[in-house]
Image (cartoon, grey):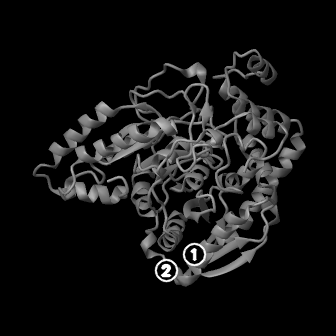
Amino acid sequence: MLTASATTLAAEIRAGRLSPVDVVDAHIARIEQVDPLLNAMVARRFEQARAEALAARERLVGADPDDLPPFLGVPCTIKEFFRVAGMPRTAGLVARKGRVEQEDATAVARLRAAGFIVLGVSNVPEGGLWMETTNLVYGRTNNPWDLSRTPGGSSGGEAALIAAGASPVGLGSDIGGSIRIPAAMCGTIGHKPSGGLVPNSGQFPEHLDDTLQYLSTGPLCRTTRDLSALLEILAGPDGIDPHCRPMPLRDPATVDLHHLHVVTLEDIGLPVSGEMRLGLQRAAAALADRGATVQSARLDRMRRAMEIWSAMLAEASSHPYSEILGEGRRIHVLGELARHAFGRPRHSWEALLVTLGEVLTGFVPAVSRHFVEEGRALRQQLDELLAGDTVLLHPPYTRPAPRHRGAWTTPFHAGCTAIFNVMQSAVTVVPTGFDSRGLPVAVQVVGRQGADGLTIAAARAIEDALGGWQKAEPRPLRHSETWGPTQTRRILEGRELQ
């Protein structure tokens, strides 16, 4: 039960070979086993979940399986950014502690209507927009493959739970890599839907401005075989998100890999590690072995991915990040840094680092306008390059999961994923194996907006060839592996943690 796909669990429950009570209890037990090490689930609803599992079991008695919700009795977990009735939604902000939601976000309501049982909500970075999962409300989440390392962010709690077999499906969101970076660092499947495919309403922050076109609500799970069914549930307008629109979903089974064209980029302008490059090469070889044509290309504008993303996001946003952190009032970075010095912080170091970057990049409007135009030109190039049955293989980050706070010195490396948000691309992340230290390695499969079925089909072929998700067994750290003054000194000196 802790390794089966959600689709398999649902089929076994409908056939009467598994009880939803047993499935829910098994995942609750796994959470209780691993979460003291991970700190991934920040609020639980186990008693309600057990009651819902009992109700699902009763509903199965004498029912026609075809009349039942497709995922009746299957557990899931939800990123804490989303409204979940009865659960907190702090977004990691101290000022939001104690708030309890009264209703579900659209995506959560659709999962429940499909029969999923919510076990609880998972940890996030403060306010999002950071590739590590830590905040002053819940603390830091650890990677289940190595507790001294980050699970990624901002859907890091979800990825950690799924990697450890504690949840078969998680709901995440992604405006710069927040599904894909955690999926890659924890070795799970993650899908960033095409811009506009899934409504983003009911999640933090609530501002319905033009940034919604670049935000994607999507699933993390154990296998690509769950993705199509999950997208069928989640996709479609809800009348709230103005950027969500009807979009046909192609069945991945209809993709003929002999007609698939695969593109890799010669240079992305970032120092991608040898093991990440090797993982991408393995993925390309796996597709070539199944009949795909592989070629390399050059897109010089991709070398400025982070600048383009930042500029296009700023152009679309009517609310700066400093205002989001301040719940409608801009925070003053220097004042908040002083509070840290006096031991009275209200915001995490990571959130203040992002805010400081926002302030610095806003000083030269002409530069921002230039990168917006560059982004529009890149969108046209990508759409032409990915026409027909063509996908791009791209690293989801420059290296496997770094140690905690190891991303402080490399914030621009999130450009590996962030650029595809403002391109509104469909992107699937799939594991390609492990590095020499036993850390997951993965690849992004990128398609044009609307090509979700195509990227899922290619990712499925890579999964079948290279093994896909494997369940992590977290182990306590030895004293020599824990965070200490040596690691802190290396960060302050500007030396990356590997």
Q: Residues within 10 Å of mark 1 (few under 14, many from 20)?
A: some
- Up/down of 496 relative to 269, above or below: above
Q: Residue at x 56, y 43 (%)?
A: 156
Quadrant (top left, top right, bottom left, bottom right) of the N terminus: bottom left
Residue nearest the observer in this picture, 418 or 247: 418
Q: How many marks?
A: 2
Picture layout, residue 296 above or below residue 190 = below
Q: Residue visible at 55% across and 62% down?
A: 431
Q: Could you say whether the residue bearing mark 1 is in a helix, strand or loop?
A: loop
Q: Amino acid at mark 1?
A: Asp
| Label annotation for residue 389 | 1
**Residue 40 seen in render:** no
Disc nearer the start of the sequence (1/2): 2
**218 relative position to 331: left or right:** left
Q: Residue at coordinates 47% horizontally, 35% vertically from top-left?
A: 36
- Position of residue 168 relative to residue 142, above or below, is below
Tell whether label 2 touches label 1 (CB within 8 Å): yes
Query: Which residue is depicted at the point 76% across and 34% down?
Result: 353
Residue 457: percent from the left, percent from the top? 49, 70
Q: Left or right: 27 with respect to 202?
A: left
Q: Quadrant of residue 334?
A: top right
Q: CA distance from mark 1 to mark 2?
A: 9 Å
